[in-house]
Amino acid sequence: MAAISGNSGNISGNGIVGNLNTWSATISRAVSDVTSFDGAGRKRILGVYDLTGSAGGTLDDGASFISGGTLAAFTNASGGAVVLTSDSGNAITANVVVESVALGASKTGDATVTFNFSLASTTTGTTVPFTIAWS
């Protein structure tokens, strides 16, 4: 097993654009408490999958950021594919909606952007609704 770094990481898709230099993702599952009255301890079962995350960096004045006077990330209401890649090429691919975009500027020169996203799954049954290619 070799250590990896995020030096050559990348994020692409669904209107998330800019000079991005960071991303994070949290993968989780809902948990239901199904403990009965006669149970001596808690009993829990796993439910649906979820993926939430963010991507950030510095603003880019490219036309792809703004589309028709609105943020391009908000134009796809049902979500779009996003690929989160680490330095070694390992990747997480998911259909997400962008929930919010935070923009900032400072006197010292930073002009930042952060995209916050959540899973927008159309997968049915018990199939995992995202792909993780990690070796």
Image: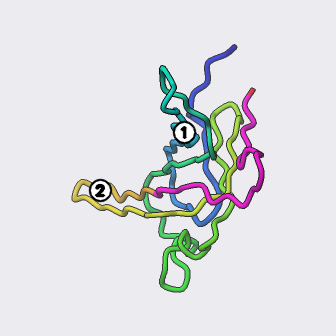
Q: Amino acid at mark 2?
A: Gly
Residue at image coords 51%, 25%: 39
Quarter location, residue 85:
top right
Cα distance in 3D space between marks 1 and 2: 44 Å
Q: Quadrant of the N terminus?
A: top right
Work out whether 93 lies above or below 64: above
Q: Which contiguous range is marked in magenta?
A: 115-134
Q: Residue furthest left?
A: 107
Residue at image coords 73%, 44%: 128
* Helix, strand or loop at mark 2: loop
93, 120: nearer the viewer: 120
Residue at image coords 65%, 55%: 82
Earlier residue among tags 1 and 2 = 1
Work out whether 81 lies above or below 7: below
Disc 1: which residue: 31
Residue 44 coordinates in the image, percent (x, y): 55, 32
Disc 2: which residue: 109
Query: Dot 2: within a 10 Å radius of its alpha carbon, few (fewer than 14), some, or many (20 or more) residues?
Result: few
